[in-house]
Amino acid sequence: MQLKTVTLDDLRKADNIDELLSSMTDPLKQVDLSLLRGHLDKVRKNIEFNRNMDRVAVLSLAAQDFISELLPYIVRLYSNCQTETKKQKGLAFLEGYEDYCSARDIKPTDSAKKAYVDIDEDSIASAKKEAATKALFTYLTNRYQDMDNCHNYAKKMLGFDKAAEIKASEPRDID
């Protein structure tokens, strides 16, 4: 099955965001991050050779802008995935275990219910989607922090921001 990649423009133009987000089976593979990768590569190359700090500052801001626009959609998708996982586990706990137990001559007990939830295919699929979404969220927040550090470094190297030293040493909470 071919997965359709979803770009930021698709998310912006979608009539029903929840429908588009729920159609994603694997967010790690379906969210198009090629624009972000391009910015990251250019920033790394320029910093590696310690040149074009003005370009690094602009590129890091562009990458931060892209990430900050994409993150709300990923947070919404993650929230939807958590809800779906809880729903699937609840359905497996309440309904699916009886057929499983009767097919295998297992006495339906509370421990059998709990064990069935862990092997139910729908529960596993929704948990995988939730994990992929959380991984994408973590990746994006880390890249946001990287680009913030690059931007502050570039400003410092250009002599525009003496406060960057103080700001970089302060603890931050992105969540």
Image (spheres, grey):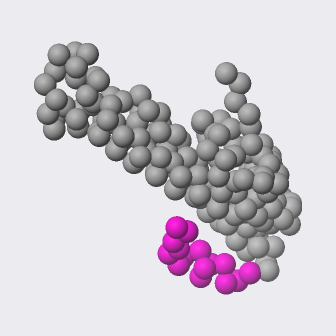
Residue 159 at x, y = what percent? Answer: 79, 78
Residue at 52% in and 67% down: 175
Classify residue 149 by image quadrant: bottom right
Tell me the quadrant of the picture where the N terminus can be found.
top right
User: Residue 155, how many percent across, how many down?
Assistant: 76, 73
Residue at image location 29% in from the left, 40% down from the top: 94
Q: At 65% from the left edge and 35% from the top edge, which residue is drawn? A: 29
Q: Quadrant of residue 70?
A: bottom right
Above or below, 19 against 71 in this view is above
Query: Residue 33's x, y, as percent?
Result: 73, 45
Foreground of the two, 164 or 59: 59
* SS majority, magenta: loop
The magenta segment:
161-175
Is residue 172 highlighted in magenta? yes
Q: Is residue 42 magenta?
A: no
**How many numbered circles does the render carry?**
0
Residue 161 makes an appearance in the image = yes
Location of residue 76 by image quarter? bottom right
Q: Is residue 142 left or right of residue 98?
A: right
Q: Is residue 81 above or below residue 147?
A: above
Q: In the rendered view, does 21 fall on the left or right side of 7? A: left
Q: Is residue 60 left or right of residue 91?
A: right
Of the pair 100 and 31, the residue shown nearer to us = 100
Residue 60 appears anywhere in the view:
no
- Check the image and report above or below for 150 versus 113: below
* Residue 156 percent location from the top left of the image: 73, 74
- Residue drawn 73% across the image and 62% down it: 69
**In front: 22, or 44?**
22
